[in-house]
Amino acid sequence: MTIRSAVSALSQVGYVLLAPAELAQTLQVNLDQLEPLRASWNDLPKDGYLRDGGSYRSRRHSCFVQEIPGGIVEAPHRAHWQSTDYNALHGGIERWFEPIAPATRSNPAWLALLSGYGELFAALRATPRWFIEAHQFRIDTAEGIGRPTPEGAHRDGVDFVVVMLIERRHVRGGETRVFQARGSAGVRFTMTEPWTALLLNDADVIHETTPIQPEGVPGVRDTLVLTYRADGFQAKASE
């Protein structure tokens, strides 16, 4: 797949699903160079903000700014914030997560991945820069059920979203669902292969992933979620 065809899909239907080989071709990234990053998902602190009482989610969070054209730099560490319009469960509060490990966020392959997505999105929406939030997630089934999207079907309040599968083992469920924000059309699929990536035009679609359950032994579902926003990081009105 080319950037042109990916941009066309994002414009016309609001999403595009890239298999690993398509990802490598579209973004011009080397999957072998990305592979060492996967180990960093084994060192994610528990998410202490879950309001459903669970402890099935672990995560790290860091922010970046990408100049278009130009390079990408890490932004000062900040809280993750969403309004209740976009996250009824966890919106309206500042959530401070541990930053992504320095060795990961400075890795050239990591920076190339984030930059590649930014350049693709800039082909659809012209902007001088992207404000990027990166979230490493691990959902586990140690308690029986893990919920990738406890807030339900939602938009994120940004311009574009990437949901990339890093690992999936010993679980069933975890079906991804994408629906038109202003209509009834939708698709459902399950990402199973590492480095599969779902790209979303956040203004046009809503998305969710169904709960996962253990398959024989407790399992995990690891993802990298990236959001790209042209108008600055989401923040409380006082900032």
Image: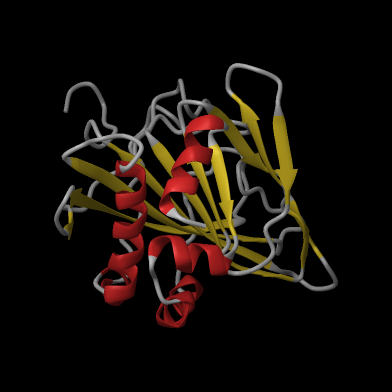
Could you tell me residue 25's position as x and y percent? 46, 66
Left or right position of 129 against 119: left
Left or right position of 76 against 218: left
Look at the image and name its color scheme: secondary structure
Label total for image: 0
User: Residue 11 versus residue 218: which sits nearer the camera?
Assistant: 11
From the viewer's perspective, is residue 230 above or below residue 25?
A: above
From the viewer's perspective, is residue 58 above or below residue 238?
A: below
Could you tell me residue 66's position as x and y percent? 20, 51
State the residue lying farthest toward the right: 216
Could you tell me residue 119's position as x and y percent? 30, 51
State the residue lying farthest toward the top: 182
Image point (37%, 33%), residue name: 158
Image point (30%, 61%), residue name: 99
Image point (71%, 61%), residue name: 141
**Quadrant position of residue 26:** bottom left
User: Residue 49 versus residue 100: which sits nearer the camera?
Assistant: 100
Could you tell me residue 20's position as x and y percent? 56, 67
User: Residue 18 versus residue 147: which sits nearer the camera?
Assistant: 18
From the viewer's perspective, is residue 58 above or below residue 148?
A: below
User: Residue 86 versus residue 6: which sits nearer the camera?
Assistant: 6
Image point (70%, 26%), residue name: 185
> In which quadrant will I find the C terminus?
top left
